[in-house]
């Protein structure tokens, strides 16, 4: 009874009131407290919540402790989620092209507001991106694939990030387009990264053991 009531109270704000709270609330309350229009700003609709929950939980479990940079952070929901629910200390950073979304990302992550910036992530210096413990890149489609591929390969060659995640919300865009991943996979191998391909995302990690107990099929069956 208390949880739905709390969710309702939290939903009263224009966007996500929940983000003013601390990590003691449950993850389902976090999701139910987000207004549909905020999900829509991030390009998601209600039919997508189960996947989002799985992906958010996945990231909060597997991101290593340290600075996390989200390229294409939208309103900063995912940053807030991993910062709140990860058992490790994650310091969120985010970049997005859209001014309005970055303003909301700052509001959603008040403690880390200065870490969110308006920018085209392709213009960020690789040297700076390489300093983050983990980087997640959100792409929409093939349009900017060449630049994305170059950016990820340059990061792999630096060998500094512990984890790089490439995500495309388009269903099976990445695994089906194997030719897209080929150059990345070969550079990853040369630079001692392991490659894990899921339905909508790819994880490049120095630590092959992180998925030892993980049911990867969960994402393929979704
Ligand atoms: C589908 S949304 C994902 C938002 C959030 N990461 C999430 O998972 O809910 C993708 C975001 O990437 C941003 N984006 C796309 N290309 C970008 C670029 N070159 N530089 C910065 N942001 C970009 C878009 O503005 C959009 O907000």
Image (cartoon, grey):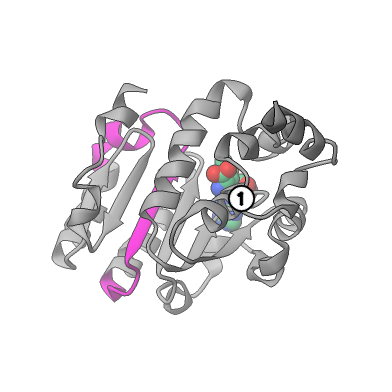
Q: Is residue 134 left or right of residue 94?
A: left
Can you tell me whether the CB of the residue at mark 1 lies under 8 Å from the nearest atom of ligand 1? no
Residue ID at (36%, 58%) = 164
Relative placement, left or right, of 176 versus 167 is left
Identify the magenta region. 157-179
Is 19 on the left-hand or right-hand side of 94?
A: right
Is residue 57 magenta-colored? no
Q: Residue at x 78, y 39 (%)?
A: 10
Closer to the camera in the image, 56 or 189: 56
Q: Position of residue 157 (x, y in %)?
A: 27, 71
Q: Which residue is mark 1?
A: 24
Mark 1 is surrounded, within 10 Å at the Cα level, by few (under 14), some (14 to 19) or many (20 or more) other residues, namely: few
Task: Look at the image and tell me whether residue 41 can be seen.
Answer: yes
x%, y% of residue 219? 34, 31
Q: Assign the N terminus to one quadrant of the image.
A: top right
Would residue 171 be counted in the magenta stretch? yes
Query: Circle 1 sits in a helix, a strand or a loop, which is it?
Result: loop
Q: Residue at x 63, y 40 (%)?
A: 30
Check the image and report above or below for 37 versus 196: above
């Amino acid at each position: 009874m208390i949880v739905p009531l709390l969710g309702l109270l939290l939903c009263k704000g224009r966007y996500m009131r929940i983000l003013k709270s601390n990590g003691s609330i449950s993850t389902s309350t976090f999701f139910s407290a987000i207004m549909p229009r905020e999900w829509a700003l991030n390009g998601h609709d209600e039919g997508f919540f189960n996947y989002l929950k799985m992906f958010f939980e996945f990231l909060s479990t597997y991101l290593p402790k340290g600075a996390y940079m989200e390229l294409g952070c939208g309103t900063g929901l995912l940053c807030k989620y991993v910062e709140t629910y990860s058992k490790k200390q994650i310091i969120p950073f985010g970049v997005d092209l859209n001014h309005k979304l970055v303003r909301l990302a700052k509001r959603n992550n008040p403690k880390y507001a200065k870490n969110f910036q308006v920018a085209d992530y392709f213009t960020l210096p690789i040297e700076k991106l390489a300093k983050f413990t983990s980087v997640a890149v959100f792409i929409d489609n093939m349009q900017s694939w060449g630049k994305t591929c170059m950016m990820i390969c340059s990061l792999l060659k630096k060998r500094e990030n512990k984890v790089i995640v490439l995500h495309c919300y388009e269903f099976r865009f990445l695994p089906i387009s194997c030719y897209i991943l080929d150059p990345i996979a070969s550079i990853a191998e040369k630079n001692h990264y392991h490659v894990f391909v899921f339905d909508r995302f790819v994880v490049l990690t120095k630590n092959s053991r992180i998925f030892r107990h993980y049911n990867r099929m969960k994402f393929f069956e979704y």
